[in-house]
Image (cartoon, rainbow, N blue to C red):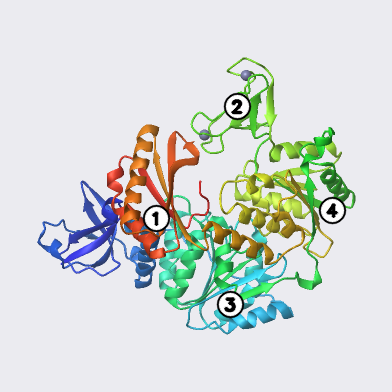
Amino acid sequence: MNYQVACNTPFNKSLLTYQSDERLEIGQSVTAPLGKREVLGWVIKEDDGEAASLNLKSIKNKFDEVMNLSEHEMKLYSWMSDYYHYPLGQLVNDALPKSMKRPRPLEAMISSKVEHLEELTPDQEEVFERIEKSLTDKFSKHLIHGVTGSGKTHIYLHLMKKVLKEGRSVLFLLPEINLTPQFLDKFRSVLDQKIYAYSSEVGASQKYQLRDTLKKNKDPIVIVGVRSSVFLPIENIGLIIVDEEHDSSFKQDDRCAYNARDVAIKRASMLQIPVVLGSATPSLESYNSLINTQLYYPLKKRVHGFNLPTIEILDQRENRDGETIEHWPLTRKSMKAIEDAYKNGEQALVFINRLGFSSYLQCSSCGHQFQCPNCSTNMRYFKARNEISCQTCATKTTMPSICPECSCITLMQKGYGTEKVEQVLKEAIKGLRVERFDRDEIKNLEQLKDSLDRFHRHEVDVLVGTQMLSKGHNFKKVNTVIVLGIDQQLNFPDFRAMERAWQTLVQVSGRSGRFGQPGKVLVQTHSPEHPLFVHITQHHFSEFYEEELDLRQRATCPPVAKMAVIYLTYKDKNILIKKSLELGQWLEGLKNHHYDKVDILGPRPAIMEKRVNKFTWTILLRSSDLMQLHAVLSMCQSNLDNFKPVQIKMDVDPQVIS
Ligand SMILES: [Zn+2]
Ligand SMILES: [Zn+2]
């Protein structure tokens, strides 16, 4: 008998034909000979085509029962392989754990004493009841669009309890588990079934054991997991929830560029179950797909009548009058707000999405900047470590004392990061306890928990942090939040720049005044007249979306049109450019003959053209016709060999066009 097998290889889209004397099941994991080696593969289908006459290699070994795919898994992975144009065998190999001889179990959390789950507020109750009606054997997609502090989690918990009670399992996806330990504690305290937390902390061995456990398990359970938990073989799922559905960490950058939210939606539709998306700042995609339906649930108020914080936009150009900012980069108003909070016995947060002491160094006489030797980017200065380092490839070197071009000894420190702000605050306010909450300072889970614990106990007055601090935290004594560096996000050359800045500002503001005190958020910017700030300060709920959708419509960008990016990468720039132009021309040819509804933009250099000694160019494809777009991508995938040795990667529904 002959079989088509999806092998762990990019060759021929990973689909190869083998013969086997023994009968094989569809989904069976096998080891298959490929050249001189053996690779892992999965049986896709029986093959009785013309290949039968060829001299086929034979499959010698079934591999591992735990690694076999169910019918549902086969369907889901096949869809992903087609949609994201990624070889099926490689995709499955990446998604499944590694096979282990003596795996370690992953402990489930289960509470010995379950607490009573508080009642829903009338607003929450209404949403719950409407979604509850859909908890049947039918696919439905829901969006809870609720301001920060409106109690979305509370609605999720009631829905989960209901589904578990009916004997079915729940898959709960969130961008990041470790940053918010309180979240998991809450789940454990009110749900009376086993909860498995699935994050990057789970070891390879435990992942394998969990797969085995889940495949055999029939009891209702809860999986709370990050992106890759969307693949877990949970039997009898009754509900999938995607919290913070807008978050870009649901999108995988390397290898198969899938978005776990979209895979979750697809999975729910294949399983004929409901999927609930939730966010204070939904993606334009989700908003647009549900706004005019009965499955969109706005929650415009915080619980208990708590108010949203007041948001003030501060003009960072105040030193234009010749007045210097004494505590640069913090304006006088920001300093005053932090000082007031301190005097009132409260805490404050300062956000900047940049690490280090300064963004780059520049020679004061000749203007030389210190670029990374391997990447087209400047090295950042880290004062405590006395070094400059590249954020892309981690190359670092001791802080230079003279300019290599002109030997001048005055090197200006330009821009700022968390380290700078920490120092400014410490020097400006006597006795103020300031700590940093960023990747530079916090390197493991223990440090993270320790830092958060001490902040909760008020042993620290101000936390200066990056995005790590913006997600989901609830701090009792924080009513003051300062936001720096939003301009960089607003000015990023990408059609999603506004959406991302909006999401950052709303999420960050949401950390203020969570417990009923009047909250205050100060946003420093060089362009206070930017239209986005009107939506932010007025707490507009849907106006931003309507305006942004209109812009996307006019620019033919998602969600109105579909997009894909082709990345070409190679170490030799000349060869790369030649091949990029060839691919561009070939695509133009396709467009002119059959696919006139696909726009082809580029090739052009990537925003960061050189990364770790490799160069990248991009070609952007855009179309309102999904069929045509995928047809072009599919042909491109079949033709990759013609563009060797350049490495080509496709990204469908890109989050960032870099
Ligand atoms: Zn110089
Ligand atoms: Zn570098």
Identity, as a three-letter code, of the amino acid under mark 1: Asp
**Foreground pick, 342 / 564:** 564
Q: Earlier in the sequence, mark 1 or mark 3?
A: 1
In-front residue for pair 429/548? 548
Which of these two is toward me, 323 or 332? 323
Dot 2 or dot 1, earlier in sequence: 1
Mark nearer the viewer, 4 or 2: 2
Report the mark closest to the observer, 1 or 3: 3
Badge number at residue 338: none
Please tell me the numbered disc located at residue 94: 1
Give the residue type that dot 3 points to: Leu
3D distance between C-alphas at marks 4 and 2: 41 Å
Three-letter code for the amino acid on which mark 2 is drawn: Gln
Q: Residue furthest right?
A: 343
Q: Quadrant of the N terminus?
A: bottom left
Pointer 2: what residue?
369
Amino acid type assigned to the residue bearing label 4 in the image:
Glu
Q: State the residue position of label 4.
A: 346
